[in-house]
Amino acid sequence: MPHITPLAHLYAVSIESQEAADDIAGLAVLYGQRLQALAYFMSGDLDVAQDAVQTVLLRITKQPTSANYHYGYARRAVINEVTGHHRQLTTLRRYLPRLVGRQVQESPEQQVVDRHALVQALRGLPPKQRAATVLRYFEDATFEEIADVLECETATARSLVSRGLKALRKTMEGETDGLV
Amino acid sequence: MDSFERRLVADLATIADTLPPLGPTARPRRTPPLSPLVATFAVLALALGAAYVARSDSPPSPQPVAPAPSTPADALTTQVANSLYRFAGLDGFGKPVADEDTGLVTLSWSGPVPDEVAAEAGVRPNGVRVQIIRSDYSMEELDAASEAILARYPIPDNPHLGSVGPDDQMSGLRVTVDPTWLAAHDVAQVTDEFADLAGVPVRVLPTDVEGMPAP
């Protein structure tokens, strides 16, 4: 069940147009949670993910064009925010000791899914492989859509997914004989 | 789709469902200062690692990780810092930085500070202090400067680049690069090239394997 985010309330006061406020509120409610998950799988860290999504949503409010409100735009922007700038990843490494400790504390669902292991395995993939794999298996994106987001040929997208899956399979099955 | 792929799809969906709500609890993470606690831990971890390597040829095993500090004061300070992002659309907005150890939030601002922003300075009823300091550049300006460097040197094509982003004082950019790469190049020349691209002062620092600038 999707969470109702207070993000829209937080940012609604800073944008000028009520129409834009309605749009960004709708975007956050509709897509915020999914974007956060996408960013989390890309970065391996919840704080980085939330920062990336907030940054993208804030950017959309500052450039309120109709195209920016399209989910595809937000999705591409979140992926670029996490992978392209690299600043978040650096921050992640900087704070790793504290965040790893927190993840262990906050993961009661580990009995169901070895979240840490899967997210760690994803983090072990090169950024484009990781993005392609997450887009394919979390976003259910076609290879054409993946190619569009990553700005590459469809064959390249197919190859990225294939190599990402192979690496994940090797890591996960090698360590645990299965994902769970 | 084989069984591994089906399970991957299911597990990703499960993990996504267990994530907490997206909300204002996220910390402002645009190059925040290294807190004394984390710095102390990092130095200690590096020292332990060095000592271990000195005694053994085998790779060091993962060190136990200290649990995260989480007190009401932490949350309040972060909450106040996040609330300042409502001014992010105003000209001159710099960066809210939360010091959880002292309960101090510092908002940097470039140019004239609007009255509504200036009114934020002081001590909140919850004890969190807010101060506003002048900075040479706004976040928008330094983001644009970062983009100028990253457009010329995209990270995926330039693995020696560690990070590009505003420094903590919002006085320019800090670029971290691989120390081996840096040792083989003229630091002054590299710095000048980045500064020419960015149009703002740039400091080039070596990045250690953990992504932190070397001392």
Image (spheres, coloured by chain):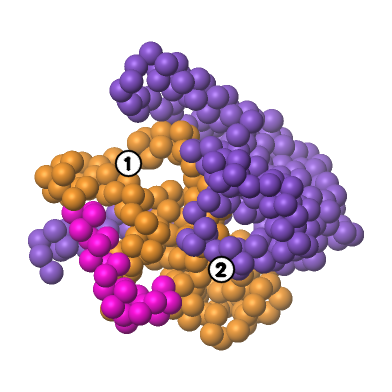
Chain colours: A orange, B purple
Which residue extends farthest bottom? Answer: A66
Three-letter amino acid code at the position of disc 1? Ser
Instruction: Please report contact status of discs 2 and 1: CB closer than 8 Å, yes or no.
Output: no
Choose between B104 and A68: the one closer to the eye: A68
- What is the spatial separation of the Cα atoms under label 2 and label 1, in whole angstroms? 27 Å
Does residue A136 appear left or right of residue B126 in this picture?
Answer: left
Is residue B96 visible from the viewing direction of this image? no
**Pointer 1 local density, CA inside 10 Å: few below 14, some 14–19, many at least 20:** some
Residue beneath the point at 39% across and 50% down: A44
Task: Give the numbered dot on residue A57.
Answer: 2
Three-letter amino acid code at the position of disc 2? Leu
Q: On what subunit does the disc labeled 1 rest? A: A
Q: How many marks?
A: 2
Which residue extends farthest top? Answer: B55
Does residue B127 appear left or right of residue A49 in this picture?
Answer: right
Q: Position of residue A115 (x, y in %)?
A: 28, 47
Q: Is residue B33 above or below residue A86?
A: above
Quarter assignment of residue A175: top left
Does residue B110 appear left or right of residue B66 in this picture?
Answer: right
Per the image, label 1 sits on a secondary structure element best described as loop
Which residue is identified by label 1?
A: A107
Q: Is residue B167 above or below residue A17?
A: above
Choose between B71 and A156: the one closer to the eye: A156
Q: Position of residue B71 (x, y in %)?
A: 54, 32
Which residues, given as a range, are shown in magenta?
A144-169
